[in-house]
Amino acid sequence: MLQPLQKAFKTSLPVLAGYLVLGAGFGMMMKAAGYSVFWALAMSVFVYAGSMQYAAVGLLSAGTGLLPLALTTLMVNARHLFYGISMLEPYRKAGKTKPYLIFALTDETYSLVCDGKRSIRDCLLLSALDQAYWVAGSVLGALLGEVLPFSTEGVDFALTALFLTVFTDQWLHSKSHFPALCGVGVSAVCLAVFGPDRFLLPAMAGITALLLAGSLWQKQDPQKEVSPDE
Amino acid sequence: MSDPLYLAAAVAVMALVTAGLRFAPFLLLGGRRTPRLVVYLGKVFPSATVGMLVVYGLKGISFSAAGGFVPQLLAGAVVVISYVWKRNSLVSIVGGTAVYMVLVQTVF
């Protein structure tokens, strides 16, 4: 057990850095808004969705109604639908741990497990470590407030850097770059057109449409090339 | 608004909607046989989605002043080039983030 844990720990180090700092940022915001550490903890344990938790601080302070809150969550987190679709096959035989693996599919955990090459045990270790970092960061932030002795401005780039290394790795290991180009291209166009707060949903729709169209155009029949394992 | 009942309900709503989105594909498509088109999407989504996440991470980029895009592009280049060269994600992430932090804190 020790060796897989060491390996998972090493893989998760970028997330450790990013989640501790971003989690602490969330905890500090909760504290500044007047909420006790309990609520920061509850959100990081049960909601466990970084960007939504950041948005929630303001929404809760404003006393936003439950229905608008649900709709905001739906829009901010809709991208998680893609993660589930990607992990259907890799997590098919996950057994008892499957519900937790699915629950814990954040952006960062997804980027670590999405190649489908890790064992279920490794995925589980990564998922649990990542959430532990996030919870620890938010509790520390809520307890300590703004007491860090040095400026952490810009440290959140660690998560973008993580996505970039995963992206580069996938690029180097794949024959067709169409899906990758499609993801970056459609998202960039949607970001320019719809702006940073509203581009994810149109980007998801556009990516799905283009991938489906691309497969039809390439092979006439997307169903032939795709599932060699059947 | 720090009525505990409201807060508990709000946390429950956010938790249920988020978990609902994460579980939906498994509940709707995870039957004994996954439709082939979905299997296809499952294979191409990782590359496309990580591409989307890269853009998502860079969504604060702005071309109206050099400080709004030069740090991101330089640090991003450090990450990609060092990764292609050394294939060590930790080195690339730490290096790129350090470059970014120095740029936003001292240069821009």
Image: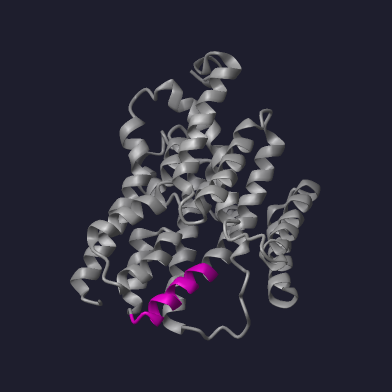
Residue B100 painted magenta? no
A65 relative to B53, above or below: below
The answer to whether residue A49 of the structure is visible from this angle is: yes
**For this rendering, which residue is in front, A142 or A10?**
A142
Question: Residue shown at 57%/24% (left/top)?
Answer: A214
Residue at the outermost right position: B85
Q: In the image, residue B17 lies at what x, y percent?
A: 30, 51
Predominant SS of the magenta segment = helix
Question: Residue shown at 69%/53% (left/top)?
Answer: B89
**For this rendering, which residue is in front, B89 or B28?**
B28
Residue at the outermost left position: B5
A213 relative to A172, above or below: above
Count the labels in the image.
0
The answer to whether residue A228 of the structure is visible from this angle is: no
Question: Residue shown at 53%/30% (left/top)?
Answer: A210
Q: In the image, residue A10 lies at what x, y percent?
A: 62, 57
Which portion, as a residue range, is magenta?
A21-34
> What colouring style does the render use?
one colour
Q: Is residue A161 left or right of residue A200?
A: right
Q: Is residue A156 left or right of residue A39?
A: right
A147 relative to A199, above or below: below
Residue A26 painted magenta? yes
Q: In the image, residue A181 lies at what x, y percent?
A: 64, 37
Question: Residue shown at 36%/66% (left/top)?
Answer: A56
